[in-house]
Image: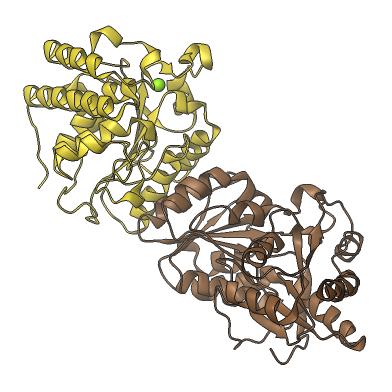
Amino acid sequence: MNIILKTREELVLKSIEIRKDIISAIAEAGSGHTGGSLDLADIFTCLYFHILNHRPEEPNWENRDRMVLSIGHVAPVLYVTLAHAGYFPIEELKTLRKLGSRLQGHPGRDHGLPGLELSAGSLGQGLSVAVGMALANKIDKKDGYVYCILGDGELQEGSVWEAAMSAAHHKFNKLIALVDRNNCQIDGVTSDVMEIEPIIDKWKSFGWNVLSCDGHNHIEIIETFEKVKTTSDRPSVIIAKTIMGKGVRSIEGNYKWHGKAPSKEEALDFIEQIDNNG
Amino acid sequence: MDNLIIKSHRATKEGFAEGLRIAGNNPKVIGLGADITASVGMNLFAEAFPERFFSFGIAEQNCIGVASGLALSEKIPVFSTYAVFSALRTTDQIRISVCYNKLHVIIGGAHAGVSVGPDGATHQALEDIAIMRSLPNITIISPCDATQTKLAIIAAIDNMNSPMYIRYGREAVPDFTIENQNFEIGKAQTMVEGNDLTIIATGHLVWEAIIAAGKLKDKGINARVINLHTIKPIDEEAIIKAARETGIIITAEEHQIQGGMGSAVAEVVVKEYPVPMDFIGMKSSFGESGKPEELLKKYGMTSDSIYKIAIENFSRKKSDQKL
Ligand SMILES: [Mg+2]
């Protein structure tokens, strides 16, 4: 069965473990996307240890909730969370990005890692796939939810809005998207690279139910997901305000850590910072 | 293949529509529409199974993603629109969401070739084979007439489990293959037997190749005509056999010569049994408006052009053999 963490303390502790393992795995790999992986740790903890209806021992259980990661580059937070949830051994995290590994740089289902709903890495595709899953659930009258994690920079891809339009048109109320609003992308802050505000108004005008939350407050994250589930006539999106690199004070909010890996030396320092920030 | 008689003139999209209507009895089949439902032959399915047909508007990239999500949920999605959109606008979505995930998504590429006619260059898909065949895991079918298109879509739904791309046309063309033909995805069909020269054709040009073979016979040249309805995976055996037994191969397709079916054949020939080849297709140009028959003539894709190229190359074969 899946492990359910109920208290704030338990969730916070799990997020600390996940952050530390993200740092270790990326440092061991020598490359990878540190910033976004760290900032999503609290949200992934809430999803896999509280919100999702899933069975790690039966990854393809037909009534599971589906969790589609559109921003494939934050694969480390997904892998670490899946390992902690019991999908595969935690030791395997050491193989991240190495030849022959099931832990590809961006998720690749073909390599056999359990728990991956989608091979993804080209931005702007995940929400469409989530819409297709929501459609299948509706046809089969299944109760499961489909979740989709988007990046804020990803909202610059036009195809996201094609998907958004279609989900509202077909009234997929069991589709819940979450935007990792960390204000960062590779070239800089999103407002410099390409302004995406007003995000809330954009989603609203596309027919979505929109809520915001602090993406680092476990209780608020869980309550926000519960709140959007009461919506019966439209899809929902949660704009989760996050801080890139969250947990490692020395890199927090710094877009330069979007796609950078810590050296092994830096990793020791980062892990210490994560422990101290707990 | 016997009985090469024109039964009627029908667009291959009609065969697509009929086949999809039949295979659509499978409740897993879901149709996705991108606004031009009737024009691409999705209409019979949509009318028969309205509860399994969904409109997604003029948003092809999203349609491919939605199809992927359906395929990841035990459905068999069929999405068709003009090939310029379904294959070219959506290439990244097909590459990652469909092919990398190895999903049984069926993509129809309608309005393929210059024979689309008066709509002009924007709507005449002449690059789709080249793009699609470079993608791993996908199967590409380009049937020769309406009857075969019907069998192809049924086989794509019933017998396959990989990404599928089916290319078909808009114009009424000779419908000459029989219902109970031996159609197997991946197995080329020999339409005319012959050992002097081989014409490998696909799609609408198979009939043109058959006519050309008749004219060649009058000149004493026995041309073999192969219908390469499956471009990927390619029937290497049939190609190598043709190279060995006839010593020269001409390919014919309504597509750019660069990267198309002929290129795929050449990859096999050059590696396995090199013989002279020539290619009939678009010579790296866009099409234009005009009647289908006018365009096929202008761009050298009629039986007359195939005949002419075959004659020219036949002497080349003889001179090569003298060496
Ligand atoms: Mg970002």
The answer to whether residue B296 is left or right of residue A178 is right
* Residue at 69% over, 59% down: B263
Assign ligand 1 to one image quadrant.
top left
Count of numbered marks: 0
The answer to whether residue A166 is left or right of residue A209 is right
* Residue at 40% over, 61% down: B75
Image quarter (top left, top right, bottom left or bottom right) of the C terminus of chain A: top left
- Of the pair B201 and B88, the residue shown nearer to us: B201
Please say whether residue B46 is visible from this viewpoint: yes
A22 up-or-down from B15: above or below? above
| Colouring scheme, one of rainbow, by chain, secondary structure, one colour | by chain
Q: Where is residue B5 in the image (x, y as percent from the top left)?
A: 77, 88
Name, please, the residue furthest toward the top: A250
B121 up-or-down from A157: above or below? below
Chain A shade in the render: yellow
- Of the pair A160 and A268, the residue shown nearer to us: A268
B197 up-or-down from A205: above or below? below
Q: Where is residue A75 in the image (x, y as percent from the top left)?
A: 32, 34
Q: In which quarter of the image is residue A82?
A: top left
* Residue at 40% over, 15% down: A183
Q: Quadrant of residue A148?
A: top left
- Of the pair B267 and B87, the residue shown nearer to us: B267
Chain B shade in the render: brown
The answer to whether residue A274 is left or right of residue B45 is left
* Residue at 47% over, 53% down: B99
Please say whether residue A42 is visible from this viewpoint: no
Q: Where is residue B164 in the image (x, y as percent from the top left)?
A: 53, 62
Name, please, the residue furthest toward the front: B323
